[in-house]
Image (tube, coloured by chain):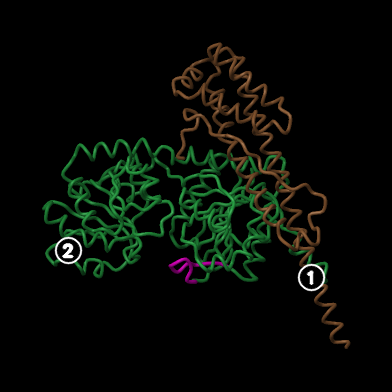
Amino acid sequence: MTETLIWTVVALILIGVYLSWTAGRLDRLHSRIDAARAALDAQLLRRASVTQELATSGVLDPAASIVLYEAAHAARQAEEDHREVAESELSQALRAVFGEPEQVELVREAPGGPEAAEELAAAVRRVPMARRFHNDAVRAARALRRHRKVRWFRLAGHAPFPLAFEMDDEPPVALADRPA
Amino acid sequence: MRIGIVCPYSWDVPGGVQFHIRDLAEHLIRLGHEVSVLAPADEETPLPPYVVSAGRAVPVPYNGSVARLNFGFLSAARVRRWLHDGTFDVVHIHEPASPSLGLLTCWAASGPIVATFHTSNPRSRAMIAAYPILQPALEKISARIAVSEYARRTLVEHLGGDAVLIPNGVDVDFFARAEPKKEWQGETLGFIGRIDEPRKGLPVLMRALPRILTERPGARLLVAGRGDEEEAVASLPPEMRSRVEFLGMVSDEDKARLLRSVDVYVAPNTGGESFGIILVEAMSAGAPVLAANLDAFAQVLDQGGAGELFANEDADALAGAAIRLLGDETRRAELSARGSSHVRRFDWSTVGADILAVYETVTDGAAAVDTDERVGGLRARLGL
């Protein structure tokens, strides 16, 4: 009788430790998502700012400037639920303007142009990077949260179900000369 | 930035991953970053100042060949001490899914972790069985890098999730500036790699060789790499054996000079390659490349645009292509020029900038790396 009791207690403790460890895993995943989302926000904002600077610098022709300014402005001002669309539109605008290597050359020739082109190139390359890291964290958290033990014991608490950030982040070819 | 890099394989044994880590560490140090590399190494091996030994590695059969790995209680303790002493801004783990230091570090660390996946291998039963063990450790990785599209596909299929693609780096100018050597020039084919490792493909080349040497009476083959030389030429007719020259293990300088000298570099590898750094080195040196059409090689060679491909393990196709190339100087010059311009994207200046961009993305606003107290903390809570 006592023996059964001891074994039950041991089993309960082990289950408790396992659940606490799983909750810890989940907690770590949630903070990873938060960090990744902050990094993604920073990169998106950086891209929009550099684009806006270029658009108002007078280096580009007026039509291209207006297209870029509009898209960058919309991306910065977008509400949360419209953000993915606005950022995708900025990607498309950048691709439309910097589709040709000559356009990038034109920017480079202007005073202060090489730095601006370099900053923009860095920004358009880092957005897909940050987004991939974010969505990777989201996927890992979702996989764990779908598990029975997490649902039955409500280990996720009140944390909202994580959502991936879906957008078109294809950089302009002329700015991202890297192996695909 | 304070950067900790973890090398899973023994520092004493030359290998692609080890060279990549050495070059990356030296590139980052040149840029002014503080770098510490944790690697398995024998006690007596002389180590560069930036390498910290994690103790002797144990030879274990793994992933189709014998790998020297670190595991066990002592290694885990050394990893924790290294993490604790280093106070790194970011830890960069190589091959986190191999049962060695990488996995141990993943387990022990908390904070920004970047991981590079080098291997590509078909889905194995062991991987499926190990999935629940690996997953909690791999979840801690904030950013994953794959060295090729092929390695990335392996990662997605085996472990889920995604990775950014950053190829292995090469110091292009080191190879481009090497001085060609007279005695290695004049209708020469080059091969670099372990002679006794069948996956490096020397047997395929040996099967193709009689036809090549018959059709091109002036041609020679230069082989650099360790292994049994007698055994390697055993399949050749005796009168042809003198036209295969073995150079043994060569230094980095001689490797560059060899690649600068040969008329065609042949890579007959039959599998197990996820990137093919040697092809990049050959292209850097301006050598026309003839390679097996492995997925990884095809990608490095721009699907045949920057080098010629032949059907894997097909000695006849290899012989045909080699004879054609040796007799066509215009085509060789064209391949050499295309290779040299294609290879710029693999230069450390480009690759290093991309890797730093990854570091900056994950460290933005994050705390420094520390030992994960949840592992040790639980032990402390239970009073052990």
Identify which amino acid the numbered label 2 is placed on.
Arg
Please name the residue shown 55% across and 27% down the image.
A92
Whether residue A55 is situated above or below residue B36 in the rendered picture: above
Output the letter for the chain in brown: A
Does the segment drawn in magenta span residue B269? Answer: no
Q: CA distance from mark 2 to mark 1?
A: 68 Å
Chain ID of residue with mark 2: B
Image x and y of residue B361, in percent: 64, 40
Name the disc covering residue A15, or none. 1
Chain ID of residue with mark 1: A
Image x and y of residue B81, in percent: 68, 61
Residue highlighted by disc 2: B241
Helix, strand or loop at label 2? It is helix
Q: Main secondary structure of the magenta part?
A: strand
Give whichever of B213, B43 is nearer the camera: B213
Does the segment drawn in magenta span residue B61? Answer: yes
Image x and y of residue B38, in percent: 58, 58
Residue B371 image-quadrant placement:
bottom right
User: Which range is magenta?
Assistant: B60-70
Q: Colour of chain B?
A: green
- Using residue B15 as the reference point, say whether residue B292 is left or right of it: left
